[in-house]
Amino acid sequence: MRMVAESPSSTIVRDTEMTRRLKLKKMALTAVFVMAASCAFAATPSKNDVLQAIAVMEKHVSGPEAAEAAKTIVIYAQVSDDVLVDIGPEQLPWVEESFGLERDKEMACKSMLMAAFVAGDIKSQIKNDRVEDDTYSGWIFAISTYNRLREKEHFRSASIDSLIKMKDDGTLLQHAREVKQAEEQEDPSDEQRKPMALIAVPGQPRA
């Protein structure tokens, strides 16, 4: 994995190995994770490690413990062959939205939401002992995290609000299936897809 230093406080993990690790099948995305320097891949998390991290995120969405859990989840998704996570603008439509928060707070909220999506997706796969992307479960976890984050920060995401409406209407699962079917029908050689940046938990919002 190629590591490029961006600043004393962050490290960029570029696209090619990231794309392979996350198995972004049939997607021509430039996936960029901005990681804290302390989040260098010193050790690969185990399945037990990631389940414990997910349990932490189910209870907490802020603070050092939640941030460390989110990092563990994202790293596991990158390096493990036991899970498959499809990530793109259809799965994480909020990444390019503006929440109207200060930069650090907005980055931290988006980071936690991305980690929550990955957590829900891989928890379903581990629980069912099946290596198959589960966008629906990722959205459910992200919606829960969004609601809890909004108890601490005053912001809204139009795209997540739309996912909540579909959940309430009983159409979210079908939407997840449609997203998957659309990606399976895409030309894997199409490189005209808009690049996307995924920010992976550099820290928590400052008070």
Image (cartoon, rainbow, N blue to C red):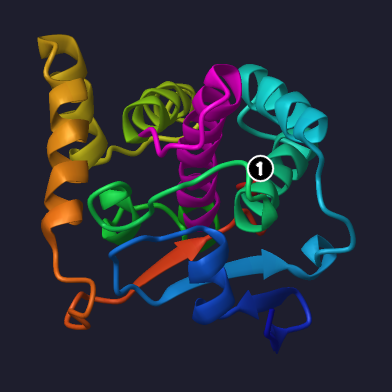
Q: Residue at x 51, y 29 (%)?
A: 130
Report the residue marked by disc 1.
Answer: 73
Q: Which residue is outermost to the front?
A: 130
Q: Is residue 85 above or below residue 37?
A: above
| Numbered-mark total | 1
- State yes or no: residue 89 in magenta: no
Location of residue 58 in the rendering, given as x and y in whole percent from the top left corner: 61, 19
Q: Quadrant of residue 132?
A: top left
Q: Residue at x 23, y 72 (%)?
A: 188
Question: Which amino acid type is marked by label 1?
Answer: Ile
127 within the magenta span: yes
Q: Which residues are magenta?
A: 107-134
Is 15 situated left or right of 166 in this image?
A: right
Please name the residue shown 50% across and 73% down the image.
32
Residue under the image location 62 percent in, 57 percent down: 78
Location of residue 156 in the rendering, given as x and y in whole percent from the top left corner: 28, 37
Provide the secondary structure element on which disc 1 rests: helix
The answer to which of 119 and 134 lies nearer the viewer is 134
- Side of 202 where 180 appears, left or right: left
- Residue 41 to residue 112: above or below: below
168 in relation to 150, above or below: above
Q: In x, y percent, where is residue 52?
A: 77, 25
Q: In the picture, which quadrant includes the C terminus?
A: top right
In the rendered structure, the answer to whether residue 13 lies left or right of residue 196 reads right
In the picture, which quadrant includes the N terminus? Answer: bottom right
Dominant secondary structure, magenta:
helix
Q: Residues within 10 Å of mark 1 (few under 14, many from 20)?
A: many
Q: Quadrant of residue 7?
A: bottom right
Residue 168: where, in percent of width, then height? 17, 11
